Amino acid sequence: MFATLLLRPRREWPVWYVLFCCATLAQSVIVAYITYGGLSEMYARQGLSLLLIGNALHPLLAMAAVYHVQRLGLRVQQPMSLHGVILLLRGAALLAILLTLKDFAYIFTEGMVGDVRRGQIVDMQPIILPESLPVLLKFGLSHFMGAFIGVVLVVPLALWALVPANRPGSVHILRSFLVYLPLLPLLIYLGNTRIPGVGADLGGLVALLFLVVVVVFSFRHGWRGAALSVLAISGLNAYSDHLLGNAPDLLELQLTIAILSAMALLFGIGMDELHTSNAALQSDKARLRQALSALAESSRRNMEVEENERKRLGHELHDDLGQLLTAMELRMAAAGKNPDIEALESISERMRQSLASVVNALGPGDLNQAGLYEALANGSLRQLCELAGIRYQVRFQGNGNLWGRLSSATVLAAYRIVQEGVNNAVKYAQCRRLDVRLRIGQHSGNRDRILLMIDMRDDGVGLDEAAIRSGFHSIRDRALAFDGEVHISGRNGLRVHVLLRQ
């Protein structure tokens, strides 16, 4: 009941309630024939009304326990967690208490207290207070432990089998369990064997070995290994000690299995979370090593680019401006007192253009003069796209007040990233359209941190994965410098998505 109600939505509970009432009524009929010899004796002891009320009350108690743990946050469709196991044990204890109180109502109505073992009613005696208090205490503990063990043994296995999030690795766990399963009946046999000449049995040692088995399976396979091993051990113990009657104290067996199952689940889920944390730590270390490697590679490329840019500027200043200055000096020397003004003006204009080219390489002129929006929307990048026959569109989104908070370094990085995207589109994409979208926002956990997202899409030929991995170093390096991320897709054209953090 507990497992079914936990796994099914509450809107189905009325249907399950009817089914459970029918099932408990059928169970009562079977118990009546086994323990009382027929229905008439049970009716004589309990009465038909009490029997029906008890069968109708049983599913309601299960619903109350499940509703309680769900209100506390138990979500079974997610992978089992330590919080979930604690709530499961809490729900099992609550249901055991409610069922024990119901069973007390039964025996006080009958005026007799006893128990069932090996299909027979045993220790049946009238209730006389306070003489019957020890018997009542034993009865209550036994029924509480029985209900608690039932939930703790069955529900974890149901969650394992029926919740997809708990199934990964199940084949390995079952295969390992089947290898060691034949050892458990052997331990049961040894536990009931007396040492010749000594008169002592091996029960204590075997119990310790059972504990070792549970610990090993919990350590290796987490809460699923714990649930499986405890179920097998409790089933074999129940067969040996309860059905065969080899143990005089049933309460001791129940208490041992209850504590073992609860502690095994807690230990197993702890090991699962430890393994998960360790895997996450290893993954974080791998990502950190990858980030450090990327940072080192980016620094190396930046040094190479900076050195090449210095050489280029040096050559340009030397070859272009130097030659123009030499030409101007020769013109002035040849002209003497009558210089050729038009020739000098032409040389001066060429010098101005060359100098503007050098200055623009050091810092975009339209960006410094008009700002980011005008530089991207109406500057040289638009002119370049129009000359290449590409329809170019730029959109800015987000809180307008945040644009003024961007640092000059972030603005320059955004411009250079879009510039690189435009150059790639013009040279290689063979596209007819290029859409650029910039969106600005704030970090949800830190309002002082600004997030700038740049999305560039074209309708060109795209790129394969190898080309994407080997190219776009400039964009990746700029994003890395701002603790950013780059995602590039080459399907149905090329899409470049960049996130910069300031």
Image: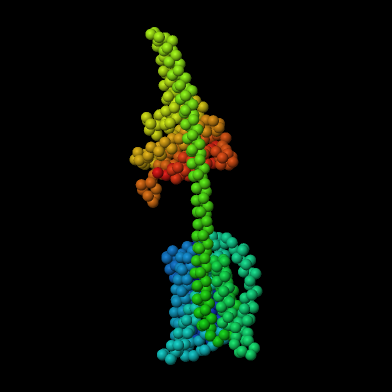
Lateral position of residue 205 relative to residue 439, left or right: right
> Is residue 162 shown above or below 487?
below
Say which of 105 and 436 sits in front: 436
Which residue is located at x 62 percent, y 63 percent? 171
Q: Residue furthest top?
A: 338
Q: Is residue 127 visible?
A: yes
Say which of 276 and 67 sits in front: 276
> Is residue 279 shown above or below 142?
above
**Number of marks in the image?**
0
Residue 429 image point, x, y percent: 55, 33
Q: Is residue 36 visible?
A: no
> Is residue 332 shown above or below 455?
above
Which residue is located at x 44 percent, y 45 percent? 483
Task: Look at the image and tell me in which quarter the C terminus lies.
Answer: top left
Which residue is located at x 47 percent, y 22 percent? 320
Residue 216 image point, x, y percent: 57, 70
Residue 465 image point, x, y percent: 58, 42
Which residue is located at x 48 percent, y 38 percent? 302
Residue 104 image point, x, y percent: 45, 82
Say which of 408 and 86 sits in front: 408
Say which of 470 and 334 sits in front: 334
